[in-house]
Amino acid sequence: MHNPSRFRFSPLAVLVALVFSLQALAQAQPRPVKAPPRPDYLQMVYPADQHLFIGPQPFYPDLQRLKQAGITKVINFRTPEEMKQLRFDEAAELKKMGIDYVMIPIGGKAFPRSPEQTKALAQALAGEQGKVLMHCRSGHRASEAYIAWLINEKGVPVNEALDRARAFGWWPPGLEGLLGKKMIVTLEDPSPKTSAQKQ
């Protein structure tokens, strides 16, 4: 005859099994790794000169630090698509703080590098008396624009301008280290040559 008591479960046994199952599941889950604290934004900024500073993308908590540091204008070289990924409106927040904002997009197929961007930077810096932060995502494009501005607009010799980029970390290229020799850059003269010059 069928005995239904044989299939009854003890509540205590079920509870013990549940506890062990939860412990095993917890041990199997990877423990979250705490990200190291982000350094103060101003520690990631390079002074190009007394009034120009180059740095990475500032985030919302960093904007107040810019105000405290006396930044009066921010020039952003990121593209509109890149800026959509942020969780705050950089232009609007800076405007609230009384900091001027200029966007000169560089990057991707939509905004290839061109002399027009250098001219736009020259226009943004013309007559500027305050402190200016130039930034992109990492500071690389901003430093490129700064070097191009020095060469094209300020007449600084190309190799002298590039030497200023050493502080930004992208110059000299790795090839210079592998060669063990300093690279000297020569700019091509874009002016057309006459037939007499060709001879």
Image: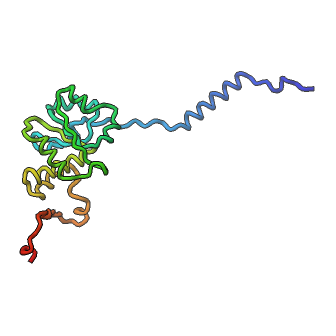
Nearest the viewer among 49 and 194 is 194
Where does the N terminus fall, quadrant-wise? Answer: top right
Q: Is residue 51 at least partly visible in the picture?
A: yes
Q: Is residue 146 above or below residue 96?
A: below
Please name the residue shown 19% across and 48% down the image.
117
Where does the C terminus fall, quadrant-wise? Answer: bottom left
Nearest the viewer among 132 and 127 is 127
Q: Is residue 186 at least partly visible in the picture?
A: no
Q: How is the image coloured?
A: rainbow
Q: How many marks?
A: 0
Q: Residue furthest front?
A: 195
The quarter of the picture where residue 92 lies is top left
Q: Residue furthest right?
A: 1
Question: Seen in the image, is 38 located left or right of residue 134?
Answer: right
- The x and y percentages for residue 140 are 24, 48
Please name the residue shown 23% across and 48% down the image.
141
- The x and y percentages for residue 64 are 22, 28
Q: Is residue 36 above or below residue 154?
A: above
The quarter of the picture where residue 81 lies is top left
Question: Seen in the image, is 53 located left or right of residue 38?
Answer: left
- The x and y percentages for residue 151 are 11, 54
Nearest the viewer among 134 and 3 is 134
Q: Is residue 63 above or below residue 111?
A: above
The quarter of the picture where residue 75 lies is top left
- The x and y percentages for residue 76 are 22, 40
Q: Residue furthest top?
A: 11
Please name the residue shown 28% across and 30% down the image.
61
